[in-house]
Amino acid sequence: MRRMHLGLAMLYCGLSLGIDYPFAAFIAALVIAFGWVGLVHVPMRRLLLIVLVAFGVPFTLRQVQVAAVLGVEFWYRDVLYSVLRRVPMASTFFSVPDSLTLSKYYEAHNVIKWPGGGGPVLLLTWAFVFIRAHVATLGLLSLPLGLAGVYAGWIRHRVSGPMRAGLALLVALWMAVGVTLLVFGEYVSVFYGVLLMPLAVHWVVLLLGLTSYVLVAHRQCISSFAFGKRRFAVPAGALLLAVFVLWRVGTEVRNIVALPPVGYPGRHALAELKGHSVATLWISSAPSAYTDQWAATLQTARWLVKSPHRFVFNPDEDYYVFFEVDRDNPRYRRPDFLLIPGLQVWGLTRRCQPLSGWVLGFADGCSDLTMPATQLAGIPLYRRGEDFLLYDLRHLRRN
């Protein structure tokens, strides 16, 4: 049974590489932290070997695959450029080609260059942006609560019962997040901070859970104090529990009002376009999921000023990450529809900034569609909603 558990753990660790390298680094650091805080009773040398094998084998296979398909020279340059671009501390010692040069190099090999990268090491700024995003969603009380968690984690050896294991896990999660932020810098602060992708959410949920456990366990605590000649008894435990519950409920209600859960803009209209191609802002896979047909992501705004009679796209210039096998096929130059979703993307002005703009919610209802609607007044509007514009481009083929 122990071997089966070990094998499954190593399998899951290896699969994390398929999500993202920073996330895999977080998992690797977390496993090592488990051993350091005593949650995993395995000698550290053996634990390091397990991590090395679990992550090293799939990583090596991936590198062999890239080298076999694209050549050893490209593989070497890709590894070098990726490290220099995605690990800020490495780029301080070695130079990396500019973004335009790298884009052309990768495009020549039909490979997507990961956006961003490079820049100076600004650890305090990254940490501030990361923490600010979570404070914006959790509320100001999360700051003293987080500091209390740090203190409790520091003195965890004085605590008995299930709280000791919970605090040890909290410390391990903080260590893993800190290592990931230190290695990958701005990418982690933005992707897992401002965009609130699930990484730090693990310790947030644990911290709130431990706080709830402590408050419920001490809900009957009474504190007394003297005022003049009289002595008063205050149900401190019950009051703190009530404050905590009201804080969490109020914060969650505020978050839902500020960023209500919504579906993809124009999804019902897209579902009616089965078999039709769509050009759109943002990720093309979303429209394609509804239309069951190819879609393209527009990366420039040149189409806004084009004459309706010359509304023809160039996949090499107008589309982002367009790697269809038959990309030279003329049909890719003339999609059937143009979708402009009301997302927080380039080219759209903003009417508001929920949560002070510290958290980026793509479908937050604040993108203004007035400008593209005015610019595209000569194009037949197929459907319009509060959060999308959908234009019919098929008639342009006859003009």
Image: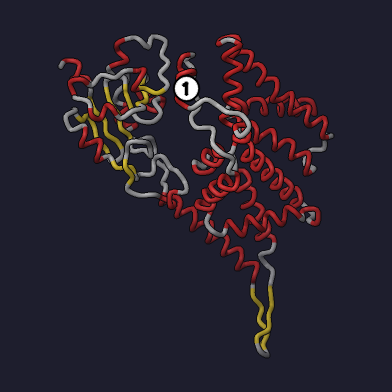
When the figure is inspected, residue 184 is found, relative to residue 296, above or below; the finding is below
Left/right of residue 41 with respect to residue 378 in the rendered view? right
Instruction: Report whether residue 1 is seen.
Output: no
**Residue lying farthest to the right in this orientation:** 43
Query: Going 53% across and 47% down the picture, which residue do you hit?
Result: 129
Q: Residue at x 59, y 15 (%)?
A: 75
Pinpoint residue 38: horizontal percent, then vertical percent. 80, 42
| Image spot of residue 357 (x, y percent) | 43, 49
Q: How many marks?
A: 1
Viewer can see residue 132 = yes
Image coloring type: secondary structure
Residue at 49% from the left image edge and 56% from the top image edge:
251
**Mark 1 lies on residue:** 101
Q: In this view, which residue lies farthest toward the bottom?
A: 229
Q: Is residue 80 left or right of residue 308?
A: right
Residue pictured at 36% horizontal, 38% vertical: 343
Tag 1: residue type? Thr
Residue 254 location (% of width, % of height): 45, 54
| Secondary element at image label 1 | helix
Q: Which quarter of the figure is the N terminus placed in?
A: top right
Instruction: Count residues near mark 1 (Cα–Cα under 10 Å), then give few for <14, some for 14-19, many for 20+.
Output: few
